[in-house]
């Protein structure tokens, strides 16, 4: 793990997690769902760096780059979700050691939340399928806020629902959007090394912690 918390800072009472690419390995499913949608609606095969730019942002935000027609954006979202749902259980797993690490945090009395840019129902499905069950006190999804990561609104809502001050919480994520959201909300931030984003992009956000493996989550 990266450098420990500086002396004099308040002890952590809550850990907030992004979901996809942080706790569950769903990145290939997300990439395929996105590529399938753009092939179907735009006959376009997105290169990896193009897709990565929007990863972690809500679907409507991503597809609004291709059309201003609200009905077409909704049609693209529907195509994405149909493909994603059909392949979800076969392609999504927890990152090795992630469930046990989160269980250790909960056993120590740490409050836990999910802050994700996917819809709450989709987040719940992923958590249940991957063995996280009822470990999380709060889930904030895209349908819970009008502003999304990297805006601080979803992190602030999670903190409010947990009843924890920002300085006593850390936001854990695999994307710069996660870390920017936590930083703007006043939490500490922890970047994970096992997601799809390049290390230099994550380090540029100056995270308080660097987690090399899912097992390091328990060290928080």
Image (cartoon, grey):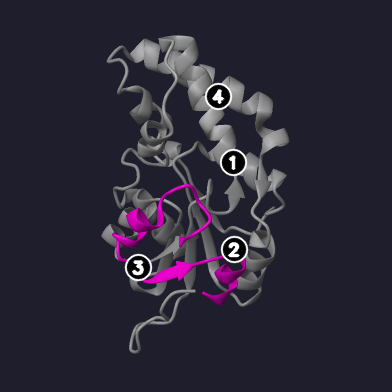
Disc 2 and disc 4: Cα gap in Å? 27 Å
Say the numbered circle drawn on residue 192.
none
Taking the spot 60% from the left edge, 22% from the top edge, the residue there is 83
Disc 3 and disc 1: Cα gap in Å? 28 Å
Taking the spot 59% from the left edge, 58% from the top edge, the residue there is 136
> Is disc 2 surrounded by few (<14), some (14 to 19) or many (20+) residues within 10 Å?
many
Residue 203 falls inside the magenta stretch: yes
Disc 1 and disc 2: Cα gap in Å? 15 Å
Q: x and y percent of residue 126 in the render?
A: 63, 42
Q: Earlier in the sequence, mark 2 or mark 4?
A: 4
Q: Which is closer to the viewer, label 2 or label 3?
A: 2
Q: What residue does disc 4 label?
A: 81
In the depicted structure, whether residue 3 falls above or below residue 94: below
Question: Foreground: 46 or 117?
Answer: 46
Say the numbered circle drawn on residue 26.
1
Q: What residue does disc 2 label?
A: 214
Q: Secondary structure at mark 1?
A: loop
Which residues lie in the magenta part? 192-220
Q: Earlier in the sequence, mark 1 or mark 2?
A: 1
């Amino acid at each position: 793990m990266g450098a420990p918390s500086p002396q004099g800072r308040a002890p952590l009472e809550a850990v907030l997690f992004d979901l996809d690419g942080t706790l569950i390995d769903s990145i290939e499913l997300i990439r395929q769902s996105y590529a399938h949608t753009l092939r179907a609606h735009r006959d376009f095969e997105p290169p990896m760096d193009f897709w990565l730019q929007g990863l972690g942002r809500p679907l409507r935000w991503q597809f609004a780059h291709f059309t201003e027609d609200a009905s077409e954006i909704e049609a693209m979202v529907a195509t994405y979700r149909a493909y994603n749902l059909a392949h979800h259980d076969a392609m999504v797993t927890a990152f090795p050691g992630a469930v046990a690490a989160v269980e250790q945090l909960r056993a120590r009395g740490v409050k836990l939340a999910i802050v994700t840019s996917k819809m709450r129902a989709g987040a719940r499905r992923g958590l249940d399928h991957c063995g996280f069950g009822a470990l999380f006190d709060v889930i904030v999804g895209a349908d819970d806020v009008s502003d999304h990561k990297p805006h601080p609104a979803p992190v602030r809502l999670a903190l409010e629902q947990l009843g924890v001050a920002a300085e006593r919480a850390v936001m854990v994520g695999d994307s710069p959007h996660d870390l920017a959201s936590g930083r703007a909300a006043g939490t500490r931030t922890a970047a994970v090394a096992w997601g799809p984003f390049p290390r230099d992009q994550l380090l540029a956000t100056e995270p308080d912690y660097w987690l090399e493996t899912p097992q390091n989550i328990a060290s928080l």
